[in-house]
Amino acid sequence: MSDNRDGFGSKLGAIAAAAGSAIGLGNIYRFPCLAGENGGGAFLLIYVLIVLGLGIPIMMAEFYIGRRGGKNPVGSIKVLSPKTKWNWIGYIGILAAFVVLAFYSTVSGWTLEYIYKAATNFFADKDIATIEQGFVDFNNNPFRPFLWQFIFMGLTAFIIFKGIKEGVEKYTKIMMPALFVILIILCVKSLTLDGAGEGLKFLFKPDFSKVDGNVILAALGQAFFSLSVGMGALITYGSYISKKDNLATTSLSVVAADTFVAILAGIIIFPAAFTFGIQPEAGAGLAFNTLPMIFDKMTGGYFFCIIFFILLAIAALTSTISLLEVVVAFLSEEHGIKRNTAIWIGTLVALFFGVFCTLSLRTDSVFVFGNMTFFDFMDKFSANILLPIGALFIVIFVAWKMGKESFYDEITNQNTLKMSVKKFIFFIIKYVAPIVIVAIFINQIINN
């Protein structure tokens, strides 16, 4: 990393920022939904084994590219492999980050709408049909979805304007502890419910009769995409990590935080679901439709509903920050655009496409192609195409182009750190990860 380039001021800051990138809405509502649909405890066990065995090595590969190259995804690969065509891998990451940011701005706006609804007691005495209709009415509103979307992206841009140390690091070091505090409060409340025992049994007692190839692939997909693999964020954040920091312990800390949040989300949701007779496989609507109804039935539910949606907003914001930073770093470093101007460009262009994502969710929308909305297209294009392809070529580049000596040199801080597992980590990157990523990619193409 060049001396005049902004970077993280501490190891804690690097971990908080990278964990913030990984921890998002997918941890808090997508993971419990997938666990509910795929056997609970068995899914959790498989998921944990995957993030430890595969997630850490792949994350280290991305951090290696970023810190070794010292730039954005495109620029870092240019530094590591000059006068070659490998830098197109970086362009995939930039595109993935941009596409995810566009549709994520829509979802992030929902979190602010639901904080408002919770605070105004909209969910009081409402049944599930009324709450679901409220979501439809919100999407059809000509003003509110765009208001929240613009406010959320404004918050994201504000933090990026502050820079890496005074913006990204400073605010994620505040938001990540706040996120964990809110999670713990909600967990304590959930554990006092009548169905807590059944909910915990479902989450932590594996039922291997539910396990088949699809369950394993679902756990693989959730693990990889939850960790922000393949979208340029980890490479970009890696370029801001100090040469003194241990990439292995940083990766382990990020993976542990990401997994811990997913488990805590399960502890919040499953006891509540079993207490109030909600099927654990209720799907993505669990967070935005079912949980508000559950909170309304709880003692103190008004308060807990508000803090739950604040939790979702914080998780979304830490992710949008990392996604916008990928685009900004690319524009400023590869095209010589002033950083503040790059922030405006990245924010406004992401909002432009994000608005079409929001418009496509209206019942009278023209931005629907067959059975797929523009929102769905952006979601599936990134998750099913860009992320697995990006991740695949990242591990191929690290293992087969750069080689083990360069990788070992970087992750051991020029041989100043002892790392007995470095050969195992490189073996995973070189042989296991490509096979697994191809399996995920094929499964998603077949099933989508």
Image: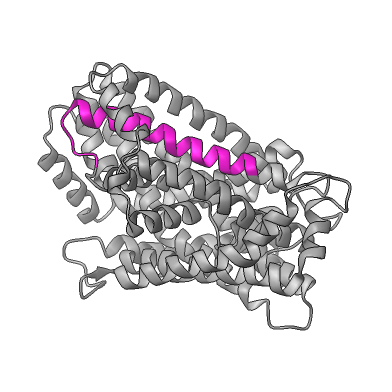
Give the main secondary structure, helix, strand or loop, of the magenta stretch.
helix
Identify which residue, 55 or 100, lies in the foreground: 55
Q: Which residue in the rendered view is the most extreme toward the front?
A: 209
Identify which residue, 412 or 53, lies in the foreground: 53
The residue segment tinted magenta is 252-280
> Is 319 left or right of 284, judged from the image as shown?
right
Q: Give coordinates of residue 32: x percent, y percent.
A: 34, 41
- Colouring method of the image: one colour
Residue at the location (70% across, 73% down)?
A: 400
Q: Give coordinates of residue 177: x percent, y percent.
A: 56, 29
Residue at the location (29% across, 44% down)?
A: 39
Residue at the location (43% across, 35% down)?
A: 263
Task: Specify whether residue 264 is painted magenta.
Answer: yes
Query: Residue 423's image quarter?
Result: bottom right
Query: Residue 252's image quarter?
Result: top right
Query: Considering only vertical position in the picture, is 145 above or below 380?
Result: above
Query: Considering only vertical position in the picture, is 125 above or below 141?
Result: above
Residue at the location (16% across, 65% down)?
A: 364
Identify which residue, 280 or 46, lies in the foreground: 46
Query: Residue 343's image quarter?
Result: bottom right
Is residue 148 visible to the viewer in this orientation of the structure? no
Task: Specify whether residue 273 is painted magenta.
Answer: yes
What is the quadrant of the C terminus in the image?
A: bottom left
Q: Give coordinates of residue 31: x percent, y percent.
A: 38, 45
Q: How many marks?
A: 0
Is residue 203 visible to the viewer in this orientation of the structure? yes
